Image (cartoon, coloured by chain):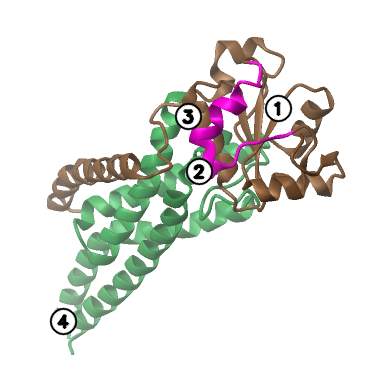
Chain colours: A brown, B green
Amino acid sequence: MGKSILIKALWQIPAILLITACVALGFNQIRNDRLPLVCQWNEQQPAAKSSESSGLKPIISIEEAALLFKNNKAVFLDARPKSFYIEGHIKGALSLPWETAEEKCIDVVEKIPSDMPIITYCDGANCELCDKLAVFLCDLGFEHVSALINGWTVWNKHNLPVNTGNTP
Amino acid sequence: MTYNNRLKMRHRISSLTIRFVLGAVFIFAGIPKIMGTAAFAGAVYNYQLLPDVLINFFAIFLPWLEVIVGIFLILGVWLPGTVVIYNGLIITFIAALVISVHRGLDISCGCFSTDSTDVINLGTILRDVALFMASLYLLFESSIEKADSLKSKQHNYLK
């Protein structure tokens, strides 16, 4: 690179980074599913480290989720619309559809012990409802929240316990 | 058309093509991550390379940087700075992938989508290395052009 080009690059790089920061943060502020700027991902938290579920990741694998289910060490939250929950859901899971999460979260989270890990799930590899719900709960102050991607499908593939109707 | 002009034209066409392809790659890589920032934050976390406090900011910032750098590269805006950032990003991506593969992590790449089936492997590293080769060409294009123009002057002088 020539000297003049290098000088140009020196002022252009911070300018591009500054423009990007303004656009990215501005867009994040106006979007409905806003991501909090700082979210304590649970592995780093002292509370999580001292708990039995210290290995809990934001994106949890089916094997880890099944183990927590088997040991009754996690609460599952179904982020899909209520009609899908009634058709079939993970046994013991509570329904908290993403669309109504803000209104209904208080009723649902009341039933969850504060130190109990929460696993959110929906259906489909590209389904983002569980991620959004996990971030929303994280934003509310829940420390042990994970999302099980494509949860309903992989749960069925592994022949794990399910239930139908309105009861967990 | 003189030898010098032919060389210039050749470099201009190859440079434009590479800029368009590399720019499009970054735009198409950035958009799905902007749409699914939360899932991308999960993918970033799984790399286990950043402290917790930076994960969400990084997940918000990086996809927009990819899109803006991609647009600037195609439109030819602030090219020296854009090309340097492009190279820096590609080097960072390769380093993150190599470290993760070396650690034996079986995680989603988060490269072109937030899909959990897009896992990191040698193929994803080679793909980024190919992009790096192309972006390196853009970085050194000006010196290549200079060298070529010198060569063409010599060529015309010897004729």
Q: Earlier in the sequence, mark 2 or mark 4?
A: 2
Q: Are marks 3 and 1 in contact (CB under 8 Å)?
A: no
Magenta extent: A93-113
Q: B67 or B9, which lies in front?
A: B67
Q: Are marks 1 and 2 in contact (CB under 8 Å)?
A: no
Q: Are marks 4 and 1 in contact (CB under 8 Å)?
A: no
Q: Chain of mark 3?
A: B
Label 3 – label 2 distance at C-alpha: 14 Å
> Which residue lies at the image location 15% right of the left edge and 75% below the top edge?
B153
Does the stretch in magenta take in A103?
Answer: yes
Q: Chain of mark 4?
A: B
Label 3 – label 4 distance at C-alpha: 55 Å
Q: Which mark is in front, 4 or 1?
A: 1
Q: Which residue is mark 3?
A: B50
Q: Which residue is mark 1?
A: A75
Q: B21 or A19, which lies in front?
A: A19
Tell me which amino acid carries mark 4: Asn
Tell me which amino acid carries mark 3: Leu
Label 2 – label 4 distance at C-alpha: 55 Å
Q: Which residue is mark 4?
A: B156
Q: Which residue is mark 2?
A: B40
Q: Which mark is in front, 3 or 4?
A: 3
> Which residue lies at the image location 40% right of the left edge and 39% below the top edge?
A34
